[in-house]
Image (spheres, rainbow, N blue to C red):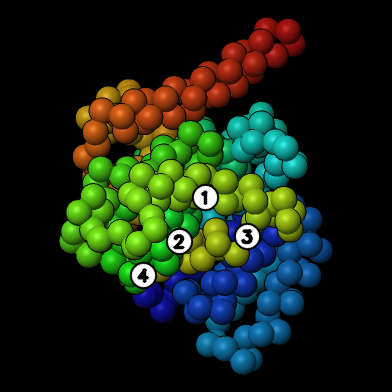
Amino acid sequence: MSKTSKVGIIGAGNVGADVANALVLLGRCVRVVLFDRTLSKAEGEVWDIEDSIPLLKEMEIIPSNQYEDLADSDIIIVTAGVQPKLGQTRLDILSDNAEIIRLTIKELDRVAPNSIIIIISNPVDVLTRIAIATSTRAENLIFGSGTVLDTARLRYQLGKQLNVAKQDIHAYVIGEHGDSQFVVWSSAFIGGILLTEFPIPQGATLEQIQQEYAQLTRKRGHNIFERKGNTSYGISTVVCQLVDTILRDEKQIFPVSARADSNYGVGSEVVLGLPCIIGSTGIERQLLLSRNALEQRLLEESANKLNEAHNRLVRKLQSQTVNN
């Protein structure tokens, strides 16, 4: 990790503040800048977090409402935007957040053109697509959190069910970070053994496990939201892991939001969660995950859903331009 490593965070809401706190607690960088349009909000969160630093590893955390303070950041995390209300899906807030992302990316291109940008705001896949289209920086320097959290949820719960350490669960959730996500069961391994050949605990079947844990993973965020009004701790830890992987150039594999390789057969414009190698230059390579015919169909359905959401937004903006 660089002695001058600097991470910027856009948005001092629940997620942004928890990301800043997690970075400080885990000592993932040397300097954190928490940006919010309302300076007093950023100050309140930063001062509260700052009080913990004397008990932790020495680092600096700065509140700001000036984009210039983000210059020279290694990584910038974008969490700004409205959150879905109870009963809304992530896609329901696309229109509200799309313009926020466009304006934010333009400012970041101005002050920090070489930083790696990680989009956390929802709906993360479509907003990452908008960010890539808006930005002038190399495409490998922009990606979204994708299905990293969904995959972590799956591996943890599946590990408990099978009584195996989560580190030995190799299974991916891909597609939309939302209702059309799915588990690529056909390439799931447990410690090098295909899940289809792994001994299943008594009283359970492979089919039951696949159905139950796919559903649990898909609904987990919604279930948390129903009970506490937001989700922030899990995604904050995901961000810390991504930051660490970039700053240490670890080349870890994460299913982040990226434009699909043409070999996936869903076109080359749609952005969705797919496994990529992440290092010091952002996305270093996208991997082609093997899948069966059913999984290919599910991937196409997820891609179509995201494409339709993006195209509806484009049509809406074109209509507004004509009417104005």
- Whether the residues at callouts 1 and 2 have beta carbons within 8 Å, the answer is yes
Q: Is residue 147 left or right of residue 234?
A: left
Secondary structure beneath dot 1 equals helix
Q: Nearer the viewer, residue 156 or 126?
A: 156
Measured Cα–Cα span from mark 4 to mark 1: 18 Å
Image x and y of residue 71, in percent: 53, 58
Residue found at x 41% / y 63%: 161
Answer with mark 4 or mark 2, whichever residue precedes in sequence.
2
Measured Cα–Cα span from mark 1 to mark 2: 9 Å
Q: Amino acid at mark 1?
A: Leu
Which quarter of the rendered picture does the N terminus lie within?
bottom left
Q: Amino acid at mark 3?
A: Ser
Give the residue at mark 1. 216
Vertical order, 48 against 241 (above or below): below
Answer with mark 4 or mark 1, whichever residue precedes in sequence.
4
Answer with mark 2 or mark 3, whichever residue precedes in sequence.
2
Q: Amino acid at mark 2?
A: Gln
Q: Which mark is residue 163?
A: 4
Q: Nearer the viewer, residue 94 or 102?
A: 94
Mark 1 closeness class: few <14, some 14–19, many ≥20 residues within 10 Å: some
Q: Amino acid at mark 4?
A: Asn
Looking at the rendered image, the disc whose residue lies closer to the viewer, 2 or 3, is 2
Answer with mark 1 or mark 3, whichever residue precedes in sequence.
1
Q: Which mark is residue 289?
A: none
Whether residue 228 is visible: yes
